[in-house]
């Protein structure tokens, strides 16, 4: 290349520096983690009353805790922690940065930083107030194991929703449909109070997971055929996860069974079997999700046929034009 060409050649714009992408990914993860904890943050952050607390106190005298550590709030812990990871993963998926791997790692680190900080602070407060004894130790260890499992589930949701593959994103949507709906309900409870929730809200919330799953499956599609596995998995999650939430809330929320592990396991199996059965009410939501997914596939198919770039339309158009041009051209 000559010198004049080099002088007149436009400069190519430089991409964002790796440090800037890393900082944005880290910030995204932190904000997503805080967003997940949002319904608890607006309540005032007072630790729930504990059955094994060392002294007798009023609810407003409980110390500040970044997580609602209590056997009665286990499903709330699942919702608050997994939503943070899911939000970060979805943000990375939508953003689709050039340095995707770097941003993904930094976003995951940001979420973990928020959740780890909240867990350490909360368990420090809990440990300082619990009474001494074996039951208090078992209670503390059980809550700690549950929070660790919730953080692991948060990372799973993050990885699925941040993926480039539609099948994995749809699977992540099925995994998070029920927790996300419960998270939204936690916002409502934190804003208006448990006793002031409008009657229509729980009725509408019942169908929201089915709508989310149906839309995700319609977006995912059935081609290639192996995506049918994602359909089965999402519909199974829509059936099982609400039953698990109900069982956990009922068993752990019953003080009469506190400490009787064998009786708690027996009751959990009975309630889980009942909620998974015909009387559990899961079948209508699964059928609604399936109907929405099939309707979405039909709409996508019709839209694809009417699209100008459809191969069948293009084959007919140019062929007709070529024939017309051939007939109109003079014979040499």
Image: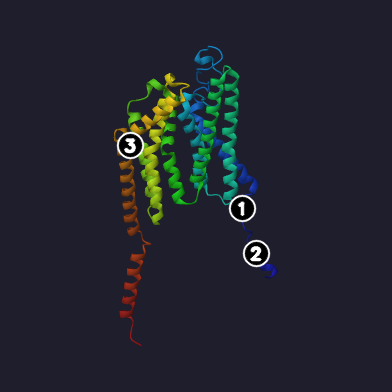
- Cα separation, mark 1 vs mark 3, equals 49 Å
The residue singled out by tag 2 in the image is: 8
In the image, taking residue 143 as reference, residue 296 lies left or right, namely left
Q: Residue at x 60, y 43 (%)?
A: 106
**In the depicted structure, whether residue 105 falls above or below residue 243:** below
The residue singled out by tag 3 in the image is: 282
Few, some or many residues within 10 Å of mark 3 (<14, 14–19, 20+): some
Q: Position of residue 190 (x, y in %)?
A: 45, 25
Viewer-side residue, 65 vs 149: 149
The residue singled out by tag 1 in the image is: 15
In the image, taking residue 238 as reference, residue 141 lies left or right, namely right
Q: Position of residue 319 (x, y in %)?
A: 33, 73
The secondary element bearing badge 1 is classed as: loop
Which quadrant of the structure image shows residue 205? top left
Few, some or many residues within 10 Å of mark 2 (<14, 14–19, 20+): few
Q: Residue at x 31, y 72 (%)?
A: 320
Q: Residue at x 60, y 26 (%)?
A: 121
Q: Earlier in the sequence, mark 2 or mark 3?
A: 2
Residue most toward the front?
Answer: 262
- Cα separation, mark 2 vs mark 1, equals 21 Å
């Amino acid at each position: 290349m000559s010198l004049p060409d080099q002088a007149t050649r436009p400069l190519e714009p430089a991409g964002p520096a790796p440090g800037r992408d890393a900082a944005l990914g880290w910030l995204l993860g932190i904000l997503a983690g805080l967003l997940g904890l949002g319904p608890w943050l607006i309540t005032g952050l007072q630790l729930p009353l504990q059955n094994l607390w060392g002294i007798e106190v009023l609810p407003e005298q409980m110390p500040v805790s970044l997580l609602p550590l209590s056997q009665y709030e286990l499903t709330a812990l699942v919702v608050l922690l997994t939503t943070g990871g899911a939000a970060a993963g979805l943000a990375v998926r939508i953003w689709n940065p050039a340095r995707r791997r770097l941003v993904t790692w930094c976003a995951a680190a940001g979420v973990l930083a928020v959740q780890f900080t909240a867990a350490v602070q909360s368990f420090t407060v809990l440990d300082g107030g619990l009474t001494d004894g074996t039951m208090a130790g078992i209670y503390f260890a059980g809550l700690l194991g549950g929070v660790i499992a919730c953080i692991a589930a948060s990372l799973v949701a993050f990885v699925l929703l941040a993926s480039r593959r539609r099948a994995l994103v749809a699977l992540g949507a099925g995994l998070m449909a029920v927790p996300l709906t419960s998270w939204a309900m936690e916002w409502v409870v934190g804003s208006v109070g448990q006793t002031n929730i409008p009657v229509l809200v729980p009725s509408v919330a019942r169908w929201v997971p089915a709508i989310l799953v149906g839309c995700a499956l319609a977006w995912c599609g059935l081609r290639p055929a192996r995506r049918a596995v994602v359909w089965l998995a999402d519909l199974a999650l829509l059936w099982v996860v609400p039953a698990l939430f109900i069982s956990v809330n009922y068993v752990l929320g019953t003080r009469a069974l506190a400490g009787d592990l064998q009786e708690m396991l027996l009751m959990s199996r009975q309630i889980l079997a009942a909620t998974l059965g015909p009387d559990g009410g899961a079948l209508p939501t699964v059928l609604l999700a399936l109907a929405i997914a099939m309707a979405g596939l039909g709409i996508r198919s019709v839209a694809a046929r009417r699209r100008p770039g459809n191969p069948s339309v293009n084959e007919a158009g140019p062929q007709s034009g070529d024939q017309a041009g051939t007939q109109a051209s003079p014979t040499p």
